[in-house]
Amino acid sequence: MNTADSIYILQKLISTPSLSKEEGATADIISAALASFGVQPKRIGHNIIAHTPGAAGLPIVLLNSHHDTVKVSEGWTKDPFGAELKDGVIYGLGSNDAGASLVSLMNCFVHYHQQEALPYQLYFIASAEEEISGKGGLELALRELSLQPDVAIVGEPTECQMAVAEKGLIVIDGEASGIAGHAANQIGDNAIYKAMKDIQWIENYTFAKQSEWLNQVKVTVTQIEAGYQHNVIPDLCKFVIDCRVNDQYSFVDFLEILRTNCSSILTPRSLRLKPSSIAMDHPLVQKGKAMGLSAYGSNTLSDQVFLNCPSLKIGPGDSHRSHQADEYIRIAEIEQGISTYKEILSGLII
């Protein structure tokens, strides 16, 4: 598999709409592409899985990226599904996030699939539903395979530098309860005022534990709803909290802090999207450092949230282009991605 093959596959993927939960056609493209290079892929939902031959008991290295996209945003001046190639640049939805990483990882996988006596088993998973953190994506694939990787490389646009930590996300529904009454008589207990006290605490509180890579925890109230009539004191006020949690807090400890200091009932929608980090002395990071790669912390979520092993987020492209109109990737970036993935795995001992 050469770079031209990767570019061709990427253009086919771009030209095929693949919104989250609607990735069937792109799953077919990925499966057929792997088969054309002598790989026998497996399919779970819209997730495509392949692995190298290897003896049981060898460490498992997972290569993962996603093939779903967000919806087309406003402002596109090019056809988002046109896969236009001009002056060394490919334009189209999903080109940068994360098509370039996906085809680069696929290229790397095919390269190592054709080799013998690897010191590890290499798995490749092209996952679905990453953009919505859906339950039919990588989480489903890992569960159905009963797969426990020892380490993972997650392909996302990082300019081929190492994202060694990633914030987690909890969305919390808050409910402050009061007692209804007539506004003119000031009889009752205003739920809005009770919620305001909690919201003010959230605004002013600083979480003490600082992360080397992810800075401080960020907690933001993003929605609020209360009342149904101007002259009735509301007995219920609902609000939503967006919580970006660094790698220094477990979700259990984080929630305990909020609940201890707030009188409202706080109910997390999910505890699945946890923060992650990889030790700087891990062999994968050490290999990257030896290659001259820099390390940083990422505020954006990826499929790392579903991994229970050390993982490194790295790939061609720039995160700032993701979800933007006229999204693009340079051919030179794909070439860099392929060479980076191959080199970081070369001689790797887990």
Image (cartoon, rainbow, N blue to C red):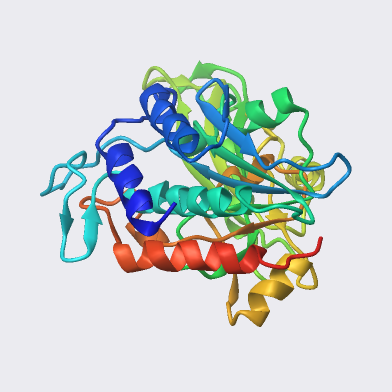
Disc tally is 0
* Quarter occupied by the C terminus: bottom right
Q: Nearer the viewer, residue 130 or 226?
A: 130
Query: At which x and y percent is residue 325?
Result: 22, 50
Q: Does residue 116 show up? A: yes
Query: At which x and y percent is residue 167?
Result: 62, 54
Quadrant assignment, res 4: bottom left
Q: Nearer the viewer, residue 347 or 320?
A: 347
Tell me: residue 43, above or below residue 343: above
- The residue sitting at 55% across, 54% down in the picture is 111
Tell me: residue 95, above or below residue 227: below
Query: At which x and y percent is residue 341?
Result: 56, 62
Question: Farthest residue toward the left?
Answer: 77
Tell me: residue 137, above or below residue 114: above
- The residue sitting at 53% across, 35% down in the picture is 127
- The residue sitting at 22% across, 65% down in the picture is 88
Tell me: residue 52, above or below residue 201: above
Q: Nearer the viewer, residue 254 or 146?
A: 146
Question: Farthest residue toward the right?
Answer: 57
- The residue sitting at 58% across, 30% down in the picture is 40
Query: At which x and y percent is residue 336?
Result: 43, 68
Q: Is residue 350 left or right of residue 65?
A: right
Q: Does residue 212 show up? A: no
